[in-house]
Amino acid sequence: MDLTILSIFLFSSLLLTTTKALDPCVSPKSKSDHSDLSLIHIYGKCSPFNPPNPASSWVNTVLNMASKDPERVTYLSSLVAQKTTSVPIGPGQQIVNVGNYVVRAKIGTPGQLMFMVLDTSSNAAWVPCSGCTGCSSTVTYSDSSFAATLSRDSLTLAADVIPNYAFGCINSVSGGSIPPQGLLGLGRGTMSLLSQSGSLYSGVFSYCLPSFKSYYFSGSLKLGPTGQPKTIRTTPLLRNPRRPSLYYVNLTGVNVGRVHIPIVPGTVITRFVAPIYNATRDEFRNQVKGPFSSLGAFDTCFSPMNEDVAPAITLRFSGMDLVLPAENSLIHSSSGSLACLAMAAAPNNVNSVLNVIANLQQQNLRILFDTVNSRVGIARENCN
């Protein structure tokens, strides 16, 4: 089966300590030949954005976000041709809706600081502002639509200044999925960051998503080949001619413990389409035993006393296997009374070839995109 790995920031001086060098909310300094930016969970301590219910536990916040995930999966499905045999990859998504991670950026002259959603399934950058006259268009994003005009100005990422950067100025919005301050597209299209930056980043970037339990929820986005892992396992990066701006990799199967769940070619994936998810879930249940209950979007929850016998989940790609650690495959209730398989079936109305590997499964992994050499790499890393 073919799959793509997918997958938001604001000025937070009030959260900074007096020792700037030790402050986890400060973005790393840019090196002369690459940029390293902090990647912040939208509801983390380094973010200015607040969860819908600030008193909620982090688990309940994740569950609330996961309840909106079907909208995001349906949107991704609309991007993929009905008969494609590939899938898209990126970090704007987990088993939750879009808008989960932001990066600090400056747009304009002088630069205006913004915390922009990072999204590898989108190409253009979008920010709320006023733009040119007479060039407005309506764009659909997730479950929202917005009117935007085309503008050009400088984009600053860490110490890198990209002049004459083309981006959309959002004039009006309907729906609730448009990020509050904007979006930075890292797709493969002509309006994306990689295309507009030319040779600056040599078609290479990577991200490392922090643990959801990390106090500061701060990972990193690295732009350019320098500073990337020297030892990393890779799988070929594929291209879907019907949707060339998306990233695709080939997923050949899933292992639950020692049992192999084959994937029929022609499907694209951690919201699995029903046949794949059901086979994975049923084998997981067979090895854990029961009883099982549900929690939000998760239908395979059990007593933590059985966690020791929970099998490891292995994602098998062309030329590479990825064994998910427990924190990437299980989620616990806020009371600690339940452990759940942190995967779910895709909505019934989505493209039957679309599967999505989500952010929860990408915690503490460096995901490398090398468009020049057509490869995606994965390496373990403490991202916090």
Image: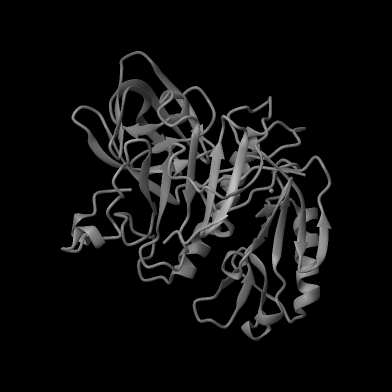
How far across and down, in percent of the image, does residue 230 sit?
A: 52, 47
- Compare residues 376 and 340 and report the one nearer the observer: 376
Q: Is residue 336 above or below residue 28?
A: below
- Compare residues 194 and 170 and report the one nearer the observer: 194
> How many numbered discs sit on the rendered protein?
0
The answer to whether residue 353 is left or right of residue 34 is right
Q: Is residue 221 above or below residue 276?
A: above
Q: Is residue 336 above or below residue 55?
A: below
Residue drawn at 43 percent across, 23 percent down: 198
Residue drawn at 77 percent across, 44 percent down: 1
Quadrant of res 86: top right
How far across and down, in percent of the image, does residue 298 sit?
A: 64, 66
How far across and down, in percent of the image, does residue 30 sit?
A: 31, 42
How far across and down, in percent of the image, does residue 127 sit?
A: 34, 34
The answer to whether residue 187 is left or right of residue 133 is right
Residue that protrudes farthest toward the bottom in the picture: 305
- Compare residues 151 and 146 and report the one nearer the observer: 151
The answer to whether residue 33 is left or right of residue 207 is left
Quadrant of res 42: bottom left
Residue drawn at 43 percent across, 40 percent down: 226
Residue that protrudes farthest toward the front in the picture: 230
Colour scheme in use: one colour
Residue drawn at 76 percent across, 54 percent down: 274
Q: Quadrant of the C terminus?
A: bottom left
The answer to whether residue 118 is left or right of residue 37 is right
Residue that protrudes farthest toward the top in the picture: 134
Q: Is residue 8 visible?
A: no
